[in-house]
């Protein structure tokens, strides 16, 4: 699996199995140089030309080695945490650890107090993940740490480079991107040449190869899709409750494109409506948001591929998860796709891809 995010803290103990072996199959940083400011974000960069006709000089920086996906400061980026006690960090230094941990995290105990013992685990704890850090660049949402050019570059890098590697290429079954762009009302097709169309084009290539591109639906409570999730080749995932697992959360975006949901809750510790996720380089935290729904579905692809092999198409496995999932109901459920359901991985494993 591949997780594309702002940055990762892969030193969290959940990324080692019971024998102490790392679950991080590789680390990559991808960024586009703007002046000289982005050179610090991707160490030991190499220049890669973009596969765009008519513009052979355009490209991006890639760093691929241990530690490449760790946080680093972004001098001209507004997404900074200068109050962090460790050091000024590139944005989402905890976010990537949480999403990747929900995918492959080792089963771990958390003691909330002397009498409260909690267990949390990734959906596919036997799997591994390649962490791809978006190391800055230009384009939509660049100042927020998610420049569209670098997100598209990352997907192209998965297709052109990671899949070609003999050691890991065959193990890539899904790509998670816990982002959705700007939330918009309705379910209109992607604008020609727009951000969503660019993502969808690469996602279509990957989908034809049996690799799912899974993205979060967004957290703005709108009836619509994000500008990045408007295409037909990506799989947007919404968030359902924990205490009421069939009910969409109040914050999740909904549209006729969203047929799969995963249980996340509101992050409310007092009511128990939460999931736990790895937090930075140690420990765990109560999280909420569709960012933590999409990695559940991405990891479910890995679990299902392990059982059913490479023969079922991405569409077939989506249908399997939808038909074996718990039907969505409650407030706002009618705004989702017909037959929308909440992921039930055990039921999916007992089903048959059609």
Image (tube, grey):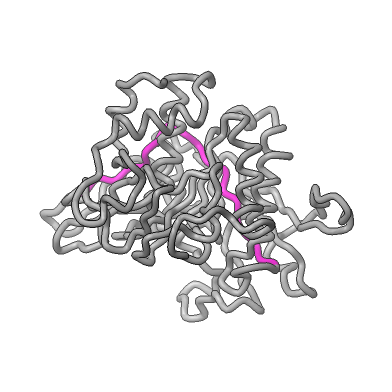
* In the depicted structure, whether residue 89 falls above or below residue 281: below
Return the residue nearer the eye: 155 or 30: 155
The residue at 37%/59% (across/down) is 253
Return the residue nearer the eye: 6 or 85: 6
Across and down, in percent, residue 125 comes to: 39, 36
The residue at 28%/27% (across/down) is 347
Residue 125 appears left or right of 181: left
What stretch of residues is rendered in magenta? 118-137
State the count of labels.
0
Instruction: Look at the image and tell me in which quarter the C terminus lies.
Output: top left
As for residue 127 lying within the magenta part, the answer is yes
Across and down, in percent, residue 44 comes to: 76, 57
Return the residue nearer the eye: 332 or 274: 332
The residue at 17%/56% (across/down) is 272
The residue at 45%/33% (across/down) is 301
* In the depicted structure, whether residue 83 falls above or below residue 226: below
């Amino acid at each position: 699996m591949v997780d594309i995010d702002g940055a990762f803290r892969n030193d969290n103990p959940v990324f080692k199995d019971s024998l102490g072996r790392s679950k991080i199959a590789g680390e990559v940083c991808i960024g586009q140089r703007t002046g000289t400011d982005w050179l610090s974000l991707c160490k030991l960069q190499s220049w890669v030309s973009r596969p765009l006709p008519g513009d052979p000089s355009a490209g991006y920086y890639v760093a691929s080695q241990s530690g490449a996906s760790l946080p680093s400061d972004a001098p001209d980026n507004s997404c900074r945490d200068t109050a962090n006690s460790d050091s000024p960090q590139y944005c989402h230094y905890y976010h990537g650890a949480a999403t990747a941990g929900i995918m492959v995290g080792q089963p771990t105990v958390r003691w909330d107090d002397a009498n409260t013992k909690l267990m949390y685990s990734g959906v596919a704890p036997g799997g591994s993940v390649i962490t791809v850090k978006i190391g800055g660049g230009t384009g939509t949402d660049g100042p927020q740490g998610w420049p569209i050019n670098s997100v598209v570059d990352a997907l192209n890098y998965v297709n052109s480079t990671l899949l070609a590697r003999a050691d890991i290429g065959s193990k890539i079954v899904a790509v998670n991107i816990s982002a959705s762009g700007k939330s918009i009302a309705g379910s209109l097709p992607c604008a020609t040449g727009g951000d969503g169309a660019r993502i969808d084009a690469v996602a279509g290539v990957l989908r034809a190869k049996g690799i799912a591109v899974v993205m979060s639906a967004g957290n703005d409570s709108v009836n619509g899709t994000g500008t990045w999730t408007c295409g037909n080749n990506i799989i947007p995932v919404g968030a359902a409750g924990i205490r009421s697992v069939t009910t969409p959360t109040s914050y999740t975006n909904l549209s006729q494109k969203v047929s799969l949901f995963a249980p996340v809750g509101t992050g409310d510790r007092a009511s128990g409506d939460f999931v736990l996720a790895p937090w930075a380089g140690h420990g765990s935290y109560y999280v909420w948001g569709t960012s933590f729904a999409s990695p559940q579905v991405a990891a479910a692809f890995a679990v299902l591929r392990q059982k059913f092999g490479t023969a079922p198409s991405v569409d077939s496995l989506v249908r399997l998860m939808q038909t074996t999932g718990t039907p969505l109901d409650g407030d706002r459920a009618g705004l989702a796709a017909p037959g929308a359901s909440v992921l039930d991985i055990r039921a999916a494993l007992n089903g048959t891809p059609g």
